Image (spheres, rainbow, N blue to C red):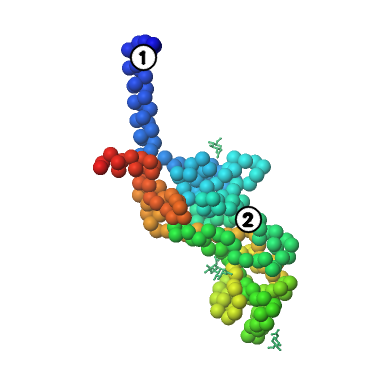
Amino acid sequence: MAPIIPFFVLVVLSQFLLIHSAEDEGNRLGVDCPSFPCGKLGDLAFPFTEGGRPDCGLFVVNGCNSTSRGVQVQLEHGGRWYEVDKISQGDTLTIYDKILAEQLQQRDCQSLNNLSLPNLPYVSFKIVPNVTLCKCRTSSNISLPKETELRHTPCDKYNIYYHRPKPPPSGDTDQDDRLSSLCPCPTIQLPLSEPPPDNDNLFDLLTPIVSVKVYISGLCLACHRRGGRCLARNQNFYCGEGISEDEQIWREARTR
Ligand SMILES: *[C@@H]1O[C@H](CO)[C@@H](O)[C@H](O)[C@H]1NC(C)=O
Ligand SMILES: *[C@@H]1O[C@H](CO)[C@@H](O)[C@H](O)[C@H]1NC(C)=O
Ligand SMILES: *[C@@H]1O[C@H](CO)[C@@H](O)[C@H](O)[C@H]1NC(C)=O
Ligand SMILES: *[C@@H]1O[C@H](CO)[C@@H](O)[C@H](O)[C@H]1NC(C)=O
């Protein structure tokens, strides 16, 4: 037998539900992605978002409240987590690359390779500053044109050629471009210590503290500026117009 619920209780309950759904609606329609405090990094906002709010940005950060572990950032869904050193002006991110750190510490130049920063249609990353290395197999028996400025470090099965960076302000990237076109082997570009060391040692030249300039696509930024949410999905992005994807689907279904 169904319990008998007094009429006034039903009225109160249904009003409560109404208020609640109105609030939910407001939240979904409003742009409620406020900036959030992140320890020594200060307040962060789009394109960064907290772990619990994947609907608010492109790069998830975790550990803002942790005193022991550092803050970590994930630059693409399912990608590697990097320790964050610094975020400045919202467009330059300084991260720590553990793998590179280990290679440098062990003086392991054989396994040096390009960093595995994601390559995505809605965002690109530029390592600033970086140095170009020309990595040739010893067995390939190639010879680079004699250039007095060119340094080289022998590794077990490779020779690595590079230019000693010019000190700022000249900060000349021409010599790296020249090396890229000259190099008959694969080239790699790795973060350059700042300020550059005053010796030629490859392991002093490179640093695991990587400053990356973050370039977000114009369409994604335009979406964000008009109050939408530029969010990553399947290696691409979509613009939720200030409402959740579920809500959008629901609305489309209703207008049919
Ligand atoms: C960090 O702490 C603040 C204030 O205590 C809290 O509002 C926020 O949700 C916390 N963030 C995380 C990611 O736990
Ligand atoms: C290295 O620096 C040059 C000059 O700023 C830049 O064009 C290039 O994209 C950088 N390479 C990487 C891998 O970020
Ligand atoms: C490498 O090049 C030098 C000079 O061009 C040549 O004498 C030598 O035989 C070459 N070695 C191999 C393994 O091809
Ligand atoms: C490393 O990155 C540079 C710049 O993006 C590219 O030109 C080069 O081909 C890459 N090297 C390898 C071995 O993938």
Crowd rating for badge 1 (residues with CA inside 10 Å; few <14, some 14–19, many 20+): few
Q: Are marks 2 and 1 in contact (CB under 8 Å)?
A: no
| Residue at 65% across, 84% down | 143
Position of 65 with respect to 220 (left or right) is right
The spot of residue 189 in percent (x, y) is 59, 68
Secondary element at image label 2: strand
- Which of discs 2 and 1 lies nearer the camera? The answer is 1
Residue 96: image tag: 2
Q: Amino acid at mark 1?
A: Val
On the question of residue 86 being in view, the answer is: no
Front residue (pair 68, 143)? 143
When asked about the image quadrant of residue 203, the answer is bottom right
Position of 89 with respect to 3 (left or right) is right
* Quadrant where ligand 3 appears: bottom right
How many numbered marks have been drawn onto this rendered protein structure? 2
When asked about the image quadrant of residue 179, the answer is bottom right
| Residue at 34% across, 43% down | 249
The spot of residue 242 in percent (x, y) is 37, 44
The spot of residue 11 in percent (x, y) is 33, 17
**First-in-chain label (2 vs 1):** 1
Residue 80: image tag: none
Q: Which residue is mark 1?
A: 9
The vertical placement of 51 against 75, above or below, is above
Secondary element at image label 1: helix
Q: Quadrant of the N terminus?
A: top left
Position of 139 with respect to 58 (left or right) is right
The residue furthest left is 256
From mark 2 to mark 1, how far is it between C-alphas? Answer: 59 Å
The spot of residue 111 in percent (x, y) is 67, 66
On the question of residue 155 being in view, the answer is: yes
Q: Amino acid at mark 2?
A: Tyr
Q: Quadrant of the C terminus?
A: top left
